[in-house]
Structures are given as C-alpha cells and as structure tokens.
C-alpha cells in the first residue's frame, strides 16, 4: 500500500491528495527553498500575529516542506510544533531539514486537517501560510481545527487576496494564455467577508482580516526566474503550437526583465493576514 493510499481524506479532498501527493507535491519538494524565498517578506508579519510563546503547542496546516513549522518550533522552545500536509515528498524534505537544523521539538504528519482526529483543545496556536485555501469543505475543516484548539487559542492565516490584485499570478496567467481567454476563478478565502462568516460559523471570534502587500521573489535574474516560472506554471501553455508557445515564453522573459532589481526579480503580491481566537 502506498503512503498516500493510507491517508484518510474527506472525499471532497481526494483531488487535492492526488495533486499534492503527486506531481504538484514533487515540484514543491524539489523547489522548497525557492517557494519559501518567494514569500519570505511576509514572515515577520505572520509570526508577529501568531505571537507564539515559549511553551505553546503549535499546529501548522498545509505545512509543505515545513519552514513555518520549524520557525514556530524554535519560538516554542519549551513546547512543540506539528506540521500536517498531504504531500509525502514535501514532508520528507521537512523531516530531513528539521534533523539537519537540529529542531527537536517538531514533528510532521501526512494528514487531511479537515478530518484528522486531533486531540480536543490540544493546540494553543494554529497557523497556515497559504495552506488553508484548498479544503474541499472549508466549514468542516475549520470546525475541526477549532475543536483542536484550546478556548482562547489563536488562529493565524495568510491567504491570497483576489488574483486581480496579485501582480505576479495575474501577469503570468495573461502571458501564458497567449491571447486565449484567461480563467476568472479566484482562490478560496480571498474575500474577507466570506472569511469572517466562515470562521465565525466554525467557532472563532475576534476575527480580523488585514490587507498586506509584499514583493514576491522569483529568481536572481531573468534566466533563473524564467526557468522557475515555466516549471511551475508551464502547464498553462498546453494546447499552444510551437510558435505561440515560444512567443509566450519570450513575452514572459521580457516582463521578468522589467521586474528585475538589484536583489533579483520581484513582483507585487497581496495577501490577507487573518487573525482569530477560539471561542
């Protein structure tokens, strides 16, 4: 039996398991450091809001390769941090890095946080950096996380604002469409009113959504950034002939060149910093 076959997931999350314990997870495991570098500008805001105390027990949802889990564990030096994710490959990277970096109070579990049987009131802080937007049934997922959080415990999320406000993804989607219609769908948890209603229904109070904007890093130069962006988003070029594909890549390189600064290639990004407390 494969590891992913042994993971209990809600039926609504089976597609996510297939993706994240498949090709998507493999790419993110391979490029773990680049993905972390991409959103590193949000780190201080995120952990300031999380306010992890030295003896806290922290849960990191959608932890990926575990950078935020390890950071939380260092802050909770007399407590612990548990990271959960659907990707066995990313969790393998997370465990290896925790060992290499000598972070003893951290652990990782391949799990669907929507249905995982966490102990009641186990955690003081629940965090998720762009990992909470993929639940098939968000209300059930956040209700499960609320059950696992002690009364008064903290929930801190980073989620993307609408795609039109995120220069990076709106630009790449338009370029890779190469004249075709650009899909209009947004990621989940991009509307603060919906976030507040969802979390309130799940058992949270004192909910605040703060708009935060930070530069997002894509590479040290045009060649480096182009390789990474095509590797991540190149599937959007499927269906184009060679001429259209080459034209899209050249358009990408020209746009990347316009975004090159002394420290690398950066695009604007816009997120919600979501803070709440368990009732």
Image: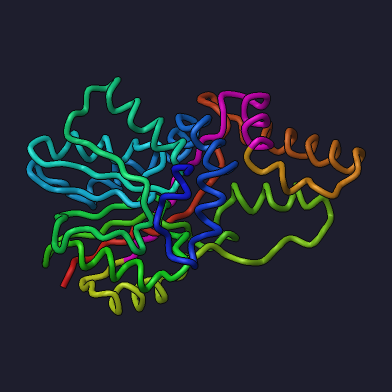
| Residue for point 69% across, 36% down | 230
Between residue 65 and residue 191, name the one nearer to us: 65
User: What percent of the width, then of the height, locates residue 171?
Assistant: 67, 49
Please tell me whether residue 214 belongs to the stretch shown in magenta: yes
Q: Is residue 170 above or below residue 244?
A: below
Which residue is at 14% across, 40% downward? 76
The tally of labels here is 0
Q: Is residue 229 left or right of residue 4?
A: right
Residue 194 lies, with reference to residue 222, above or below; the image says below
Q: Residue at x 42, y 52 (%)?
A: 130
Q: Residue furthest top?
A: 100
- What is the x, y in percent for residue 51? 17, 49
Residue 181's image quarter? bottom right
Q: Quick check: can you spot residue 189?
A: no
Q: Nearer the viewer, residue 96 or 194?
A: 96
Q: Which segment is the magenta one?
A: 209-231
Residue 67 sits in which quadrant? top left
* Quarter of the image where the C terminus is located: bottom left
The image position of residue 147, as x and y in percent, is 21, 67
Q: Is residue 132 left or right of residue 145?
A: right
**Position of 105 compared to 186: left or right?**
left
């Amino acid at each position: 039996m494969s590891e992913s076959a042994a993971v209990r997931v809600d039926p609504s999350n089976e597609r996510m398991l297939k993706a994240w314990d498949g090709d998507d997870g493999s790419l993110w495991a391979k490029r773990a450091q680049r993905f972390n570098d991409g959103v590193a500008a949000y780190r201080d805001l995120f952990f300031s809001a999380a306010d992890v105390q030295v003896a806290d027990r922290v849960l990191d949802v959608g932890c990926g390769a575990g950078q935020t889990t390890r950071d939380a564990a260092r802050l909770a030096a007399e407590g612990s941090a548990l990271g959960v994710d659907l990707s066995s490959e990313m969790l393998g990277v997370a465990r290896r890095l925790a060992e290499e970096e000598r972070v003893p109070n951290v652990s990782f579990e391949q799990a669907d946080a929507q249905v995982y049987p966490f102990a009641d009131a186990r955690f003081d802080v629940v965090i998720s950096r762009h990992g909470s937007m993929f639940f098939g049934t968000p209300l059930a997922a956040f209700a499960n996380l609320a059950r696992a959080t002690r009364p008064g415990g903290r929930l801190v999320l980073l989620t993307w604002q609408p795609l039109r406000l995120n220069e990076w993804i709106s630009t790449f989607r338009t370029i890779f469409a190469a004249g075709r219609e650009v899909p209009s769908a947004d990621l989940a948890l991009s509307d603060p009113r919906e976030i507040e209603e969802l979390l309130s229904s799940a058992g949270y109070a004192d909910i605040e959504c703060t708009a935060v904007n930070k530069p997002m890093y894509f590479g040290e130069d045009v060649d480096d950034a182009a390789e990474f962006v095509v590797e991540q988003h190149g599937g959007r070029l499927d269906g184009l002939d060679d001429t259209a594909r080459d034209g899209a890549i050249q358009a990408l390189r020209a746009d990347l060149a316009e975004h090159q600064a002394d420290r690398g290639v950066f695009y604007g990004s816009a997120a919600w910093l979501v803070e709440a407390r368990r009732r």
